[in-house]
Image (cartoon, rainbow, N blue to C red):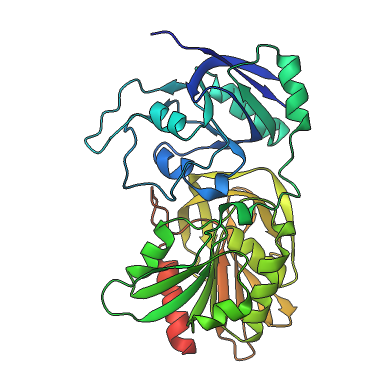
Amino acid sequence: MTFAPALLVLEDGRAFRGDSYGASGETFGEAVFATGMTGYQETLTDPSYHRQVVIQTAPHIGNTGVNDEDPESTRVWVAGYVVRDPARLPSSWRSTRTLDEELARHGVVGISAVDTRALTRHIRERGAMRVGISTVERSPDALLERVLASPPMEGANLVNDVSTRESYVVPAHGKRRCTVAALDLGIKAMTPRRLAERGVQTQVLPAWSSIDDVLAVRPDGLFMSNGPGDPATADHPVAVLRAALERRLPFFGICFGSQIFGRALGFGTYKLRYGHRGINVPVQDRVTGKVEITSHNHGFAVDAPLDRPTATPFGTAAVSHVCLNDDVVEGLRLRGEDGRTTAFSVQYHPEAAAGPHDAGYLFDRFVELMKTAR
């Protein structure tokens, strides 16, 4: 079997040659690596990966093909895809097509036969950076010029690109216990399903919805989802959340939603050197002391003090979860004057369609918070 040649060039000039994988053409984005050995279909369809070129650290990708049940959205969002040894034939009874075919179908330019270990080590040492993949350019210097002309992730406001255009409802399974208004900043399909399993009806709203749009749902709580880009640019969701917190509307945020929560509380955000992306990250719940193995996809984090609570206009905020690898803030909790929790968030992904499921209890915590407030 013969493959067309492909070229990958990082913004610092390092180049890798390999084989074309997926669509032909050229693409640019931020080079990031994901450590999951499974769940590549969920990764590809996660809107949080918009404008990112994903490098899979697991060497064999595509073994289970692609099906129509596992996507987290209606399309592949990654800007490009890098793998070492793609499967030539899938070996799952659930597969309906190959991963190569799926990438080509969505116009995603990828590259295979690359030393992904060397590439990952380079990013760990130098940090996440812009990258280009091309099946039409042979000159690293020429491709590097276009990489350097592409936009960086810092300062990128991307949530409106990935948000739903129209509001829609995901009904509760069985008897409805609560109603949630969810601001879609790049929501994954599994999140409202996890809520539905607990008797929660979710009204998913576009990212540009106002506080009046939220309140029109007559919700028992507000949810803000994961999403792509720099949280420092997301002023509108921050304003909506502040208005909700003033009304003591119970709140739960995941990933980008946690960063919005941090900003609403008065904290800053910053870009991580190479981010957390994978399904094997240890996080400690500082409330219970329990350590969870969690799923992540974030390149930014909240800058909040680990050693003390912080007074805010909405109550007292504290760091509730921390990453045991590097002490990055992985969750926040807000308490009112009566000491009760009124809002909380986590930086990781408790819905974790591809696993692990250690943090599923957070959806139960949100339901209990809404029932208590009601």
* Residue 212 visible in image: yes
In the rendered image, residue 157, in percent from the top left (x then y), is placed at: 70, 53
In the rendered image, residue 290, in percent from the top left (x then y), is placed at: 47, 63
* Image point (59%, 48%), residue name: 325
Question: In the figure, residue 127 lies in which quadrant?
Answer: top right
In the rendered image, residue 323, in percent from the top left (x then y), is placed at: 58, 54
Q: Nearer the viewer, residue 54 or 98?
A: 98
Looking at the rendering, in which quadrant would you find the N terminus? top left
Classify 69 as above or below 370. Answer: above
Q: Which residue sits furthest top?
A: 2
Question: In the figure, residue 66 lies in which quadrant?
Answer: top left
* Image point (49%, 88%), residue name: 373
Classify 33 as above or below 185. Answer: above
* Residue 308 visible in image: no
Residue 6 appears left or right of 371? right
Q: Nearer the viewer, residue 97 or 279?
A: 97
**How many labels, in total?**
0
Q: Nearer the viewer, residue 94 or 259?
A: 94
